[in-house]
């Protein structure tokens, strides 16, 4: 992370007050990213809406979603994204083996077609800003040609790509007492 303090975090009381005015749950308001985003309530509301749609009410398999997020965190060097979603993914019973494998997923022989498809789509989007026709076809097959899941896949990749840019550009600090780059402290090179 950089030098920090690009945008000062709101105090917890102020963040909770602003979040309540926006209909954002208190637990979300306590996260460092929202203690910064709540300086602009309309942006914080939009970010919360995306998270709510993709994390809690979406239909994309949670394991696939978390693998996508972890890959984005790794490739972009977003310590906050990696660290937050390490904890969430583990709570969702995504194995440590799978999470660590996103660092070099092309050589992870235990991943199946669905995992390989969404991770390829993630890498292509990060590199090229789009998913190639060939990878799209593989994703379509992996997601049973469900248009809703395909839209959600693209939205998930785009959302956490956005979050990575926000987290890194705003130099959002980890919450107190949280170790970076779990489980082993290894960071991208």
Image (spheres, helix red, strand yellow):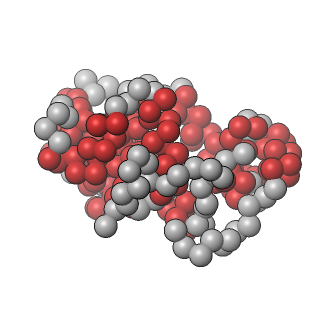
Quarter holding the C terminus is bottom left
Pick the front one: 189 or 20: 189
Residue 41 showing in the rendered view = yes
Residue 90, horizontal then vertical, whole percent: 44, 33
Going by the image, does 32 lie left or right of 112? Answer: right
The residue positioned 34% from the left and 62% from the top of the image is 188
Residue 34, horizontal then vertical, whole percent: 68, 51
Residue 129 vertical placement versus 57 (above, below):
below
Going by the image, does 56 lie left or right of 181? Answer: right
Residue 83, horizontal then vertical, whole percent: 49, 49
Going by the image, does 171 lie left or right of 21? Answer: left
Residue 76, horizontal then vertical, whole percent: 39, 61
Residue 137 showing in the rendered view = no
Residue 6 vertical placement versus 51 (above, below):
below
In terms of image quadrants, where is residue 89? Answer: top left
Number of residue marks = 0
The residue positioned 48% from the left and 42% from the top of the image is 85
The residue positioned 74% from the left and 61% from the top of the image is 9
Pick the front one: 26 or 41: 26
């Amino acid at each position: 992370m950089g030098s920090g303090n690009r945008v000062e975090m709101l105090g917890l009381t102020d963040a909770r007050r602003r979040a309540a005015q926006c209909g954002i749950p208190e637990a979300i308001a306590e996260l460092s990213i929202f203690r910064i985003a709540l300086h602009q309530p309309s942006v914080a509301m939009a970010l919360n809406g995306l998270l709510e749609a993709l994390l809690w009410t979406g239909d994309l398999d949670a394991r696939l979603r978390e693998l996508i997020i972890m890959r984005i965190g790794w490739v972009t060097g977003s310590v906050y994204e990696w660290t937050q979603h390490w904890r969430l993914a583990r709570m969702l019973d995504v194995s440590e083996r799978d999470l660590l494998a996103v660092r070099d997923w092309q050589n992870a022989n235990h991943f199946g077609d669905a995992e390989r498809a969404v991770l390829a789509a993630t890498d292509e989007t990060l590199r090229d800003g789009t998913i190639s026709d060939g990878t799209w076809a593989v994703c379509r097959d992996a997601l049973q040609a469900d248009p809703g899941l395909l839209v959600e896949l693209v939205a998930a990749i785009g959302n956490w790509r956005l979050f990575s840019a926000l987290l890194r550009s705003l130099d959002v600090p980890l919450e107190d007492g949280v170790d970076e780059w779990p489980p082993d402290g290894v960071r991208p090179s």
